[in-house]
Amino acid sequence: MAAETFLAADLGASSGRVMAGSFDGRLLALSEVNRFENGPVVVAGSKHWDLLHLWSNICRGLTAAGAKYGDQIRSVGVDTWGVDFALLGRNNVLLGNPNHYRDHRTDGILDKAFRLVSREEIFHHSGLQFMQFNTLYQLLAMKWADSPLLEMAESLLMMPDVFNWLLTGVKVNEFTNATTTQFYNPTRGHWAADLFERFQLPLHILEEITQPGTKLGHLRQELAEETGLNNVEVVLPGTHDTASAVMAVPARGVGAEKPDWCYISSGTWSLMGLELPRPVVNDRCLQLNFTNEGGVGGTIRLLKNIGGLWLIQECRRIWAKQGCEFTWEALLRLSAEAQPLVSMVNPDDATLLAPADMPHAMRDYCRRTGQAQPADEGAMVRCALESLALRYRQVLGHLEELADTKIRTIHIVGGGALNRQLCQFTADACNRRVIAGPVEATAIGNVMMQAVAAGAVSNIAEAREVIRHSFSVEEYEPSEHREAWEAAYGVFERLTT
């Protein structure tokens, strides 16, 4: 068959890109069309996303793709991070730039929310882990600040929903991103209207929930003319980037009752979990603060958000400000030379969420917990990587408990799959085989969901078979240092429980 091309607008918390996936009926080839920076913009003390910057770069990427691939292009899909949103007012007027999830407006908000509705009741309605930046608490922060934007709002669109509306004029709330809000009920399969109304939030702003694989329609006429993409449809992938990344895990089967593999979508955040046929909403899941988010094919992703490579990204940023710019390769060389398993941090400690100075915050954590403070950059990076691996070990045990299963293989996808130290540390800490790759999992999952919608492949299981044949992976086995890692895990558990 002639190659068909599917475009993925894949937006992460630090960068975005438009990727082209060309599928010849057997293999998928991925190429980058346009890459651009992303990140928070501070305006009058508040952190925002630069929506117009992102939109202009998406359009630039679509235009470049049209010039390169022409009539081969079948559709385009958008994925982004979760929880953040934009509001539209009367006549679909965009009400301001969306806030960034690390904005401090939600600091301390959980305790205030629990005074109105208990933690247990919120979890019963949503099955979602508690993080202060979940959409529910961002809306409550607006309400309690008497935001005029919330008063004027007629539609709430999650970040990928905003771009889908800009592309097509159609307003929907896609399923996988809707499940990150903490006002979607995964057991009942619709908005948790009772919970939303308990907080006296305006239910009318929520749109229809729409599943991955849905064809929204063609590009707006003026956009089709500008980009040259006539007759190109917009298709919903798993618009939450982790949902698309999990779609690209090169495993067999979809949503097994007792899966023998788990995934880590590794980047700024590490999202570690299982793909299940139904949510796990019980007291133990609440106690462990796990989350039930939507996946492709009607699956549920039982997972834990873990701090991720944010720790090193922020250290690197601070060191650059101080005049010491390190490449990732240089930092990993320094880490390899550092003494192993000397000190560790909890990647999810509140003091590491958004500190002004990450190296200082990590050293202070070690000081407060009676550990040696990392002496230099190499020790700091090694501390971060080993701490992540130990946190994965902890979450692995909880996943096996919650799903009553035995996990034999850990799939690491995303940018972290390139970090050989992290992959080997994960195999060592967890005493499991690690399969690393594909790296561009989010864009691949986005593209292959479009291919399913187009009928180019018959289902998600077949799409994963294409991915296995199209992209190489690297395997890691546990090393012989079991006793050292076991001892370190004992220390880590005492720090985090």
Image (spheres, rainbow, N blue to C red):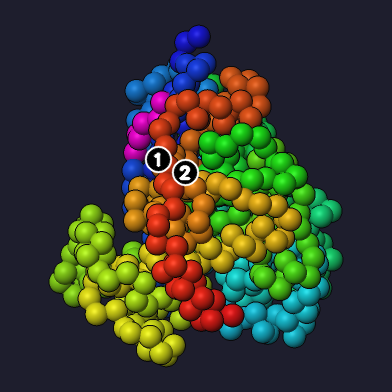
Q: Quadrant of residue 367?
A: bottom left
Q: Amino acid at mark 2?
A: Ile
Q: Are marks 2 and 1 in contact (CB under 8 Å)?
A: yes
Where in the figure is residue 383, as x and y percent of width and height? 35, 71
Q: Residue at x 70, y 61 (%)?
A: 401
Q: Residue at x 29, y 79 (%)?
A: 374
- Which region is colored magenta? 29-34
Of all residues, the one furthest to the left in this rendering is 323
Q: Amino acid at mark 1?
A: Glu
According to the image, label 1 marks what residue?
474
Q: How many marks?
A: 2
Q: Which mark is residue 156?
A: none
Q: Residue at x 50, y 9 (%)?
A: 1
Q: Is residue 31 magenta?
A: yes
Query: Horizontally, is 226 left or right of 221 in the view?
Result: left
| Camera sees residue 13 | no
Provide the secondary structure element on which disc 2 rests.
strand
Q: Is residue 278 magenta?
A: no
Where in the figure is residue 55, as x and y percent of width and height? 44, 46
Q: Quadrant of residue 366?
A: bottom left
Query: Horizontally, is 463 left or right of 13 in the view?
Result: right
Query: Which sits in the foreground, 306 or 178?
Result: 306
According to the image, label 2 marks what residue?
435
Provide the secondary structure element on which disc 1 rests.
strand
